[in-house]
């Protein structure tokens, strides 16, 4: 086989991207040694190009086994109320594991979002959303704790089922990206700097004028987030 001269990691990534098109999900790609020989580049360049496709969700590394063509990305609808994802095998539901409810004081940023004063008490609940026991997203929900603005019943409802947004009307949704810090790298079992899709939502309780803030972080290599559709 004649060598394909690649002079940078982008050339390697382009070569691998074309290779993925000829394979099926789960197929293994050639080893680093084989790619070094085929492309005529250093091992570091092969690793950098491979990492680009891993970060984009086109390839997945299985430690001790090699690099494989990834399954197509799963889709989540930001406005969906049923904790679902949509994949090549149909509709699935996240498993979720809850952390203990935390009480803290609102900072300047959070207080502006949910219409309370800086330093007011809030209740926060965090979940880890999993597929086949593998963590795929973290979900944080913050609701005011102040007496009169948020009754004990509303707090209980918020911490019990609000994360599915069934009891709330969404006011706004935004989608952005960030890189995983050490905290979320640990929770999602990815490397520091791994790309993350960040979904932030503000909602209102249907019976009380209480603003609630929800922040969900999805692994960008496994998901696409769609703003429109998916309600219900």
Image (cartoon, grey):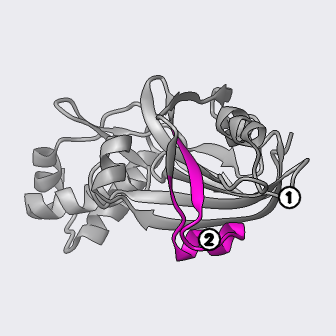
Q: Is residue 124 magenta?
A: yes
Does residue 54 show up magenta in the picture? no
**Residue sitting nearer the eye, 47 or 18:** 47
Image quadrant where residue 63 sits: top left
The residue pinned by badge 2 equals: 111
> Is 63 rendered above or below residue 185?
above
Left or right, 166 with reference to 106: right
The residue under the point 59% across, 55% down is: 122
Quarter occupied by the C terminus: top right
Asked whether 90 or 79 is in front, the reply is: 79
Mark 1 neighbour class, 10 Å CA radius: few under 14, some 14 to 19, many 20 or more: few
| Dot 2: element | helix
Of residue 151 and residue 22, the one placed in the foreground of this image is 151
Compared across the picture, whether 107 is left or right of 2 comes to right
Q: Of label 2 and label 1, which has the lower sequence position? A: 2
Q: Where is residue 98 in the image (x, y as percent from the top left)?
A: 51, 32
Q: Which residues are the magenta region?
A: 104-127
**Residue 197 coordinates in the image, percent (x, y):** 52, 58
Q: Which residue is drawn at 79% across and 57% down?
A: 210
Q: Which residue is drawn at 43% across and 40% down?
A: 70
Disc 1: which residue? 209
- For the point 77% across and 57% down, the residue is 149
Q: Where is residue 133 in the image (x, y as percent from the top left)?
A: 44, 24
């Amino acid at each position: 086989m004649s060598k394909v001269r690649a002079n940078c990691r982008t050339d390697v990534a382009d070569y691998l991207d074309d290779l993925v098109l000829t394979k099926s999900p789960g197929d293994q790609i050639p080893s680093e040694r084989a790619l070094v020989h085929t492309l005529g580049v250093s091992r570091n360049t092969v690793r950098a190009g491979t990492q680009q496709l891993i970060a984009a969700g086109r390839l997945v590394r299985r430690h001790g086994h090699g690099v494989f063509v990834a399954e197509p990305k799963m889709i989540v609808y930001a406005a969906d109320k049923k904790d679902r994802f949509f994949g090549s095998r149909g509709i699935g539901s996240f498993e979720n594991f809850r952390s203990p409810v935390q009480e803290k004081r609102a900072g300047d940023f959070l207080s502006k979002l949910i219409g309370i004063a800086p330093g007011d008490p809030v209740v926060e609940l965090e979940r880890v959303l999993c597929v086949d026991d593998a963590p795929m997203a973290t979900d944080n929900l913050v609701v005011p704790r102040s007496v009169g603005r948020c009754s004990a019943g509303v707090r209980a409802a918020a911490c019990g089922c609000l994360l599915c947004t069934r009891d709330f009307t969404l006011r706004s949704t935004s989608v952005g990206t960030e890189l995983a810090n050490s905290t979320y790298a640990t929770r999602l079992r990815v490397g520091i700097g791994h790309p993350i899709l960040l979904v932030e939502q503000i909602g209102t309780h249907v019976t009380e004028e209480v603003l609630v803030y929800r922040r969900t972080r999805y692994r960008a290599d496994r998901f696409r987030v769609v703003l429109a559709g998916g309600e219900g």
